[in-house]
Each structure stands twice: as structure tokens, then as C-alpha cells.
Amino acid sequence: MKALARLTALLTLLLSLLGSAVAQEATDCTVIIGSQVEMATGSSSDALVVIKGERIAAVGNAINGLELQPGVAPTARYQGGTCQTVDAVGSILTAGLIEVSSALGLVEIGLEQKTRHHEWEEGPNNRAGLRASDAYNPRSSLVPVARLGGLTSALVVPTGGLISGQSALVDLSGNSQQEAIVLPSAAVHANPHSGSSRAAGLYLLRQALDDARFLLRNPSAHQQGRSRDLSAPLGALRALAPVIENKIPLVLKADRAADIEAALRLAEEQNLRLVISGGAEAWLLADQLATSKSAVVIDPMVYGPGSFDQLNGRPDNAVLLDQAGVNVIISSFSSHRAGTLRQSAGNAVRAGLKPSAALWAITGAPAQAFGMPDRGEIRAGGMANLVLWSGDPLELSSVPQRVFIRGEQQALQSRQTELRERYRNLPGSPIEPPPLLRGQ
């Protein structure tokens, strides 16, 4: 009897291990069936998308090595492994949306100073060495709210001063900076027009770039006392080296056409990769921007003289830039309302932009401009940052049905949805709050 008991226990253990292995194998592979897939090359109806690990393994209407096994609970096998399936008939699959001008993870309550970690109010004008990634909070309550709007990645941007610092590219998942941060230094951001003199701002910016180039070419001269006085601390100037070497772009805040023209001249003089942020009057310089291959981040909701810098703002700004061949990026320019990004893109469509171009402006265009070649589009080998929509993603009536970040399906919950569920039945007592989980 003891031998039989031991044999039974051993068989139970083996079955348990086998079941765990199968479950692990299944969660490592997902097949999305029957959706309309929006790719850079166009739409594909009833396509198949295979997610394996963090990446998209295959896309198409017929995929070699994929065997669908229909039934009450359909399954699939791909390259010898068992996959879970997602019935997406009637849905639209897009790449995850990317917001490039927000403080997601850097701010909680706008009116509470202690929860704002993106503004550098004091100190020197040149803070190129400051990294927003050092302050990024992946557990911020704003992150899941943004995911509910279809966002899977964001460029988190510091503000303040002449040179504000370095933005970070993050995926909107994970519980630690190590898990979330993709690029700790994606771009350097500057606002030479924030002071009383625009000319003085550009002069100081040009001086900082010249000093950084001098330091890069003569690394020992300053230490040996054989150089002129530099305009900023060594750390700030050294942080500009990737900009000078064209490894990352310089993002300049500019709305007025004259300021954009001056920025283009600076970029040509310094041989820089330039991104214009704001660009309300960029349509006036569409051809020059296209020739320089400078990207422009715009808000399609700016269509009038919202300020003296936006006197010539117009709703078809994105249309005119796109027709000229400019890399147009659309932003909500918001942290708490980053989920309205697709609404901003929808307004560009209302003004005449093609829907495919508007979708590209919030997916592939920001990915290309900020060094994310494996994000922003649906293709084999790309990162599996995907959103499955109930309908047209640029329509407000559509909602995300599933959100995948690095191949992992995300919970479509946030503090807002939890509060809704807790207090939705009134009058009466609210449901008990969820228990605290240790270790979180």
C-alpha cells in the first residue's frame, strides 16, 4: 500500500509539472484571429497575428507552421507549441498608441507641488544632464488610465529652463523602472523662447552646443586648464554629446513660424536631428521642414489665435504638413488626459487628414522619430505592443477590448474604474475596498 501511495504521489507530481509546462507554453503564444489589422502597408481583413513572447512572430492571412484547431474552445499550434486564441472577428487591431509630450509617471496631482517631478523650477538654465527616467513612477495612477485610452508607450518629458533635460521612453507596464523604461535618454528638450528675449535664448543654446562640441573634441583641455570658461557644468555639456553626434534628437518648443525658421537654421548650422514641438504655425514652413527631415509634434485642436505665438494656427495644419512630406506626430500635450490622444488624431481627420496618416501620426511616426524601430507598427519581429478595438480607433464610441504590452495582456482597470464600481450603486453602502496585497 505504501508503494502504491508513493507511486500515486509521483504520478500526481508529474501530471502537475506537465500541466504547468503546458500552461506556460500556452501563455507564451497567442493567436489573434479574424480582426482587421492596420499595418503600415495598409489594412488586412480577417488576418492572423501570432504573438510569441514579447514580439510579433507572424502576420498574414496564411502563416506557415500555424495550425488552427476549431471547437468550442478553439486552440492553435505554432511551431510545435500550443497557443491560446483570441476571437477578434469584427474588431480592429492596431499598434499601441504613443504619446510623446506628457509627464506620465512624473506627476500625480497638478496643483500639488510635491507630486510634480517634471518641472525644474530652480537652478541653472542648462540641465541637459537631468533625466526624467530617474523620477519615473511606473505605479502612477495615471498610467493605467492612459492604457484605457489605448496608449502602450510614452515619452515622458521634463520642463523648465532653457535646456530642460532628457526625456525617457517608457512602456506603460511593469512595476519597476527597470521593467518599464525602454530608453532612459531618448531626446534632449529645450525651450529657447521661454525668456524675455528669443534671440538671447538661441544665443545661449548655441553657446552650450558649441561648448559641448569643444569638450567632445578636446576632452583633456578643460582638465588641464587649457580652455576658455565654459557656459555650463561639465555634466550638462557632456549630456549634449549624443545630440551633437546625432544619436538622439533635440526637441525645441516653438509655435511661431519665425521661431521655427530660426530653429531650422540652428539645426542646419549645428548638424542636428531636430524635432519641433508645438508647431502651430508650422504649415507656413512645410517645405523647409520636409527638406530638413525635421519631425513636428502638433496638437490638431489648435486652430486659432490661442496666443500671440499661434496667430496663424489653423485646423488643417497636419494636412498641409503631411502633403509636404513632413513627419507629422500628433500629441495630446497632456498627462491627465493622455487618453484623448486618439481624439486629437480624429480631429485631424475631421480637418482633412487621411485616417491612415492620422493613425500613423500616433503610432509609427513617433516611433521613428524617437528611436523605437520595433514599436509603432504591426510587423513580424516587432514588439507586441498592440490594441484590439471594438471599432474605428479614431471614433470616440470605440473602446479597447484588449491591450498587449510586450506580448502580455494588460488589465483594463484603473483607479477610475475601481471607484466607479465601488460607488455605482447609490443610494446604499459602497462595496468593501479590495484587500491590501502584501508586497505591492
Image: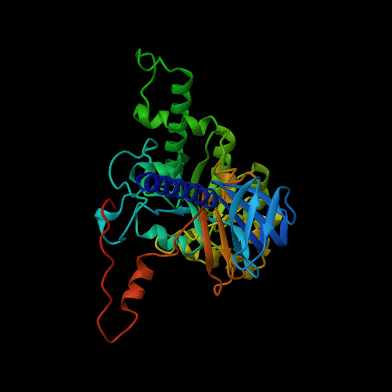
Q: Residue 197 at what x, y percent from top left?
A: 41, 46
Does residue 294 appear to the left or right of 439 in the view shown?
Answer: right
How is the protein colored in the picture? rainbow
User: Residue at point 71% right, 60% down?
Assistant: 43
The answer to whether 346 appears left or right of 234 in the picture is right
- Which residue is rendered at x = 56% and y = 43% of the image? 372
Question: At 71% from the left edge and 48% from the top edge, which residue is drawn?
Answer: 65
Residue 159 locus on image (x, y percent): 38, 49
Q: Is residue 49 above or below residue 396?
A: above
* Callout count: 0
Q: Is residue 68 visible?
A: yes
In the rendered image, residue 383, in percent from the top left (x then y), is placed at 57, 47
Q: Is residue 302 visible?
A: no
Q: Residue 222 lies in what quarter of the image?
A: top left
Residue 364 coordinates in the image, percent (x, y): 61, 51
Residue sitting farthest toward the front: 1
Question: What's the residue at 35%, 41% (across, down)?
Answer: 134
Instruction: Pick whichever, 47 or 188, lies toward us.
Output: 47
